[in-house]
Image (tube, rainbow, N blue to C red):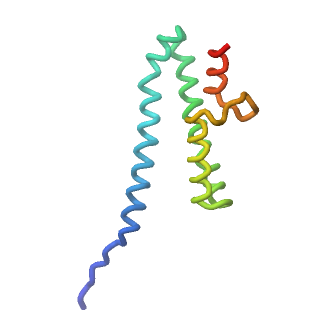
Amino acid sequence: MTATAVRPDAALWRLGGVLIMGAVLSILDATIVTVGIGSIARDLDSPLTTVQWVASAYLLAASAVIPLSGWLTDRFGGRAVWLWRRADAAGRASGLRGGGGPRAGPDDRVRAALET
């Protein structure tokens, strides 16, 4: 009996690369927040323990998005969710979502406060 080697499909390698890159970026995001805690505490003249709570809340909020993303992908499909998120990010970056309405983000409110 001879054993034949099974080579993984190229799509499987690409999928693995995307998953690894996502994990690395998530770890990098958490590391950036953690490294910045000292500077944030110093700049805001705040005790380190207070800033640590803010960083923990940020990471908890980032973790809470993962199940929501999975549910949205199951409900509407991965392509639709990805396209919606890219369009949303592009609208925020270009300033098309201004106006101070209920969907105005913190950056819109800061910009409006600076203009007055």
Of the pair 99 and 35, the residue shown nearer to us: 99
Query: Extreme right residue here?
Result: 102
State the residue at coordinates (62%, 61%).
77
Across and down, in percent, residue 52 comes to 53, 22
Across and down, in percent, residue 40 comes to 49, 17
Query: Extreme left residue here?
Result: 2
Name the side, left or right, on which 91 lies relative to 7. Answer: right
Name the side, left or right, on which 29 lies relative to 89. Answer: left
Q: Quadrant of the N terminus?
A: bottom left
Name the side, left or right, on which 20 lies relative to 67. Answer: left
Q: Quadrant of residue 70?
A: bottom right
Across and down, in percent, residue 97 comes to 66, 35
Across and down, in percent, residue 54 comes to 57, 24
Of the pair 80 and 34, the residue shown nearer to us: 80
Q: Quadrant of the C terminus?
A: top right
State the residue at coordinates (62%, 57%).
80
Q: Quadrant of residue 98?
A: top right
State the residue at coordinates (43%, 47%).
23
State the residue at coordinates (57%, 17%).
50
